[in-house]
């Protein structure tokens, strides 16, 4: 790996340009001097022959290695009049193109009917949400669950990418967390891009990036959207949302309010066999209950100058859970057999608050400064009354629990970027984050009478800095950088004489990306990077959950971060992509079990395993035929998980497959079919089952502003996850039932219009997604 780094830096240090070839770059703006976000740029010679093609990205485009000549430049963007301009190229030139808005609806409809909403480029996927069937789904999380490779946890509290772990989340190139993602209106989303191997500018966490771009195409005034979605799973769910925008000159205001009446249902069946103790346990767990949820937020944006602004944002999420956990257990200890029915009456409140303020300043014509502050707070308060019925003697109160966890995080961030010319850009920055947490537990046992009270304090600081150089060397595009992070953690119980956790580590995270275009339809990309995955703050606490008298779920205050080293290559050929990658993880985190002989209890908790390594080969393509758009992906994964306490079985390759299909049946009428799945997975320690999940959607828009849709998820009721493993001399078989079978009906209505949204705001705290 070190040789690869040295070679790449040596390659990028050579800078030279041919004297007979020039570059043509430019900025594309609308009549309000706002960058046009997307469009096509075509270059013709004097005989009207196509010379090169590219696309507008963040309002800019560039052509390299052009011979001195006279060219015709044509700009095509949806919603604007096509513009052509004759260019005499005899030196490197940078131009500015202004487009005029074109609101002819017929032209837009014509383009949409022949365009695939999913675009493949350089191994990344870009999904256009506008005018697709995905626009009819209840929430942004539901949209992500339909995208290739993305997996949503059963409780909808975490996101992962197949073979790549938890991704970073950005909204308009700005860091966001899951709560902000949930409060984002689907109506405001323009497109979503799935990026592998994000650069050093982004946080050191995450091998993948989900980049969400919002719409910027409305007119001056206001806009309010009302939405109502009813959903039928095992229980009834209802989603009510109001989203509004107001813009007047340089000031823009945003607000949203969502009230969700959720009916969660969770089920787990498990078998445990403590091999050296002669103890066997079989139990079934079911948890249900109402979950009223409030999500609200607001923000402002004020344009100080053309490139300068100040903005702020506040997001609040509050929910109440009243959920009984019922467990039916058969416990065999040697020759003794007990039938136990347990019931936990739980009352829980969760509150999440995040607020930030941003300042952006154009220092010079070629340099920019960003500075931001952020404060976040998370509170989780759980009260439980636990009853047991042993061998039909009747329910008896066993214990009362009062647990509270709170963490507050303050973060600040500064970024400076400098463009030296059209070919080189330097970015530097730094950030700091300070977290303070407290976990309080008060356990009252009835028979025999006992009481246990604990307070666990947790403090963590992260100091980070990065430098990144990017640009192009003739046709070769490159990005190379390094990030340094110092992590200080101190944690311990208040009644203990010594800290339980006392760590200080400084790590470097280099990242390199080289993209070599072969011609206009083919390219090869090379990537190398090191990544870190830190545990969620809640895992660094003493919070636990009662399952039955023999099984307890607990957090782990001793969890260490996972470090990952990865190298990959991507071959792009027209609309086909092949990606090959190899990675190694140290201290990966998985759930593990251990038997406590003193308490006669099995403790299940997240643990650091020794190592995980593997490779994956991913093939992706998109195609359009008349009114049918299709995107397909097939991934071969082979990974091996190792741990000294576990029995290591044979590791075999398995497949992940995905297909998304949209049928434009008529104007503003769309039918969608989506399916994905896994073959059986043998991953060394774990053996997991095969899956096949299919969903369908139908949407129709009336009178331009009224959209009605119906969605069917997990049609065949197959969303059941099974795993088997043996660790710490305990044989485990788990079956997790996901409440995925769903029929939902949605109605969305919007009125009013808002002028070209300038809203810009970013989260400063790089670790915000760990608050959960």
Image (cartoon, helix red, strand yellow):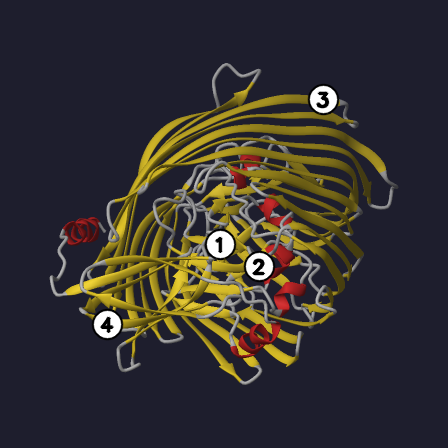
Alpha-carbon distance for marks 2 and 3?
A: 45 Å
Q: Is residue 261 above or below residue 715?
A: above
Alpha-carbon distance for marks 4 and 3?
A: 86 Å
Q: Mark 4 sits on what residue?
A: 70
Disc 2 or disc 3, which is closer to the eye? 2
> On the picture, is 508 further left or further right than 225?
left
- Element type where label 2 sits in the image: helix
Q: Mark 2 sits on what residue?
A: 144
Alpha-carbon distance for marks 4 and 1?
A: 40 Å
Of the 4 image quadrants, the one containing the C terminus is top right
Label 2 crowding class (10 Å Cα cut-off): few <14, some 14-19, many 20+? some
- Element type where label 4 sits in the image: strand
Alpha-carbon distance for marks 4 and 2?
A: 46 Å
Q: Going from the N terminus, do you reach mark 1 or mark 2 first? A: 2
Q: Mark 1 sits on what residue?
A: 210
> On the picture, is 41 further left or further right than 438?
left
Q: Going from the N terminus, do you reach mark 3 or mark 1 first? A: 1
């Amino acid at each position: 790996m070190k040789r690869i780094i040295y070679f790449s830096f040596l390659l990028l240090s050579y800078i030279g340009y041919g004297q007979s070839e020039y570059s043509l770059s430019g900025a594309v703006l609308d009549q309000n001097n706002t960058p046009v976000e997307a469009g096509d740029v075509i270059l013709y010679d004097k005989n009207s022959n196509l010379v090169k093609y590219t696309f507008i990205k963040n309002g800019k485009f560039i052509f390299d290695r052009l011979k001195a000549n006279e060219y015709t430049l044509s700009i095509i963007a949806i919603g604007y009049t096509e513009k052509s301009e004759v260019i005499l190229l005899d030196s490197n030139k940078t131009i500015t193109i202004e487009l005029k808005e074109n609101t002819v609806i017929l032209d837009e409809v014509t383009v949409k009917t022949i365009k695939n909403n999913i675009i493949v480029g350089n191994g990344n996927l870009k999904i256009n949400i506008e005018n697709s069937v995905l626009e009819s789904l209840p929430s942004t999380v539901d949209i992500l669950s339909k995208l290739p490779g993305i997996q949503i946890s059963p409780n909808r509290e975490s996101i992962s990418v197949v073979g790549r772990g938890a991704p970073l989340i950005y909204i308009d190139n700005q860091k966001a967390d899951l709560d902000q993602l949930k409060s984002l209106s689907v109506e405001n989303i323009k497109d979503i891009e799935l990026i592998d191997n994000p650069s050093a500018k982004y946080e050191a966490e995450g091998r993948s990036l989900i980049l969400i771009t919002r719409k910027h195409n409305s007119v001056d005034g206001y806009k309010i959207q009302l939405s109502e979605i009813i959903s039928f799973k095992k229980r009834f769910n209802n989603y009510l949302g109001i989203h509004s925008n107001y813009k007047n000159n340089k000031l823009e205001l945003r607000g949203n309010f969502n009230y969700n009446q959720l009916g969660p249902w969770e089920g787990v069946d498990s078998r445990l066999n403590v091999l050296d103790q002669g103890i066997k346990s079989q139990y079934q767990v079911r948890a249900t209950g109402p979950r009223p949820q409030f999500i609200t937020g607001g923000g402002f944006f004020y344009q100080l100058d053309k490139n300068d602004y100040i903005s702020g944002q506040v997001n609040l999420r509050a929910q109440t859970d009243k959920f009984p956990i019922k467990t039916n257990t058969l416990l065999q200890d040697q020759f003794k057999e007990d039938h136990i029915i347990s019931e936990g009456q739980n009352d829980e409140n969760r509150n999440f608050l995040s607020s930030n303020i941003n300042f952006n300043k154009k220092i010079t014509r070629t340099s920019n400064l960003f500075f931001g502050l952020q404060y976040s707070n998370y509170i989780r308060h759980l009260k439980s009354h636990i009853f047991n019925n042993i061998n039909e003697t009747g329910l008896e109160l066993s214990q009362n629990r009062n647990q509270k966890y709170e963490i507050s995080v303050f973060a600040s961030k500064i970024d400076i970027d400098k463009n030296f010319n059209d070919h080189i850009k330097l970015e530097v920055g730094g950030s700091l984050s300070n977290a303070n947490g407290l976990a309080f537990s008060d356990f009252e046992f009835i028979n025999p009478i006992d009481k246990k009270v604990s307070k666990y304090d947790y403090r963590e600081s992260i100091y980070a800095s990065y430098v990144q150089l990017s640009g192009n060397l003739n046709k070769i595009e490159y990005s190379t950088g390094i990030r340094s992070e110092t992590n200080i953690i101190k944690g311990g119980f208040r009644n203990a004489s010594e800290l339980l956790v006392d760590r200080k580590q400084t790590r470097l995270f280099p990242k390199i990306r080289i993209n070599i275009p072969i011609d206009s339809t083919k390219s090869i990309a090379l990537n190398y990077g090191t990544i870190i995955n830190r545990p969620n703050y809640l895992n660094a606490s003493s919070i636990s959950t009662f399952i039955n008298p023999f099984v307890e779920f607990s957090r782990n205050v001793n969890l260490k971060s996972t470090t990952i080293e990865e190298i990959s290559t991507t071959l792009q050929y027209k609309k086909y992509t092949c990606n090959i990658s190899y990675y190694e993880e140290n201290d990966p985190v998985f759930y593990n079990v251990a038997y406590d002989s003193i308490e006669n209890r099995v403790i299940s908790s997240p643990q650091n395993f020794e190592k995980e390594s593997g490779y994956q080969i991913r093939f992706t393509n998109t195609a359009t035929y008349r009114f049918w758009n299709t995107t397909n992906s097939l991934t071969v994964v082979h990974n091996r998980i190792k741990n000294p306490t576990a029995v290591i079985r044979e590791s075999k390759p398995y497949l992940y497959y995905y297909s998304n299909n949209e049928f434009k049946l008529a104007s503003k009428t769309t039918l969608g079919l989506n399916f994905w799945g896994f073959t059986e997975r043998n991953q060394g320690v774990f053996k997991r089952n095969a899956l096949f999940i299919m969903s369908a959607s139908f949407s129709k828009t009336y009178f331009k502003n009224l959209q009605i849709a119906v969605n069917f998820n997990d049609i065949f009721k197959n969303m059941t996850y099974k795993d088997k493993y043996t660790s710490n001399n305990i044989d485990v078989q788990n079956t997790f039932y996901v409440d995925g079978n769903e029929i939902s009906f949605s109605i969305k209505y919007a009125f009013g219009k808002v002028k070209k949204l300038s809203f810009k705001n970013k989260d400063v705290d790089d670790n915000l997604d760990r608050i959960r």
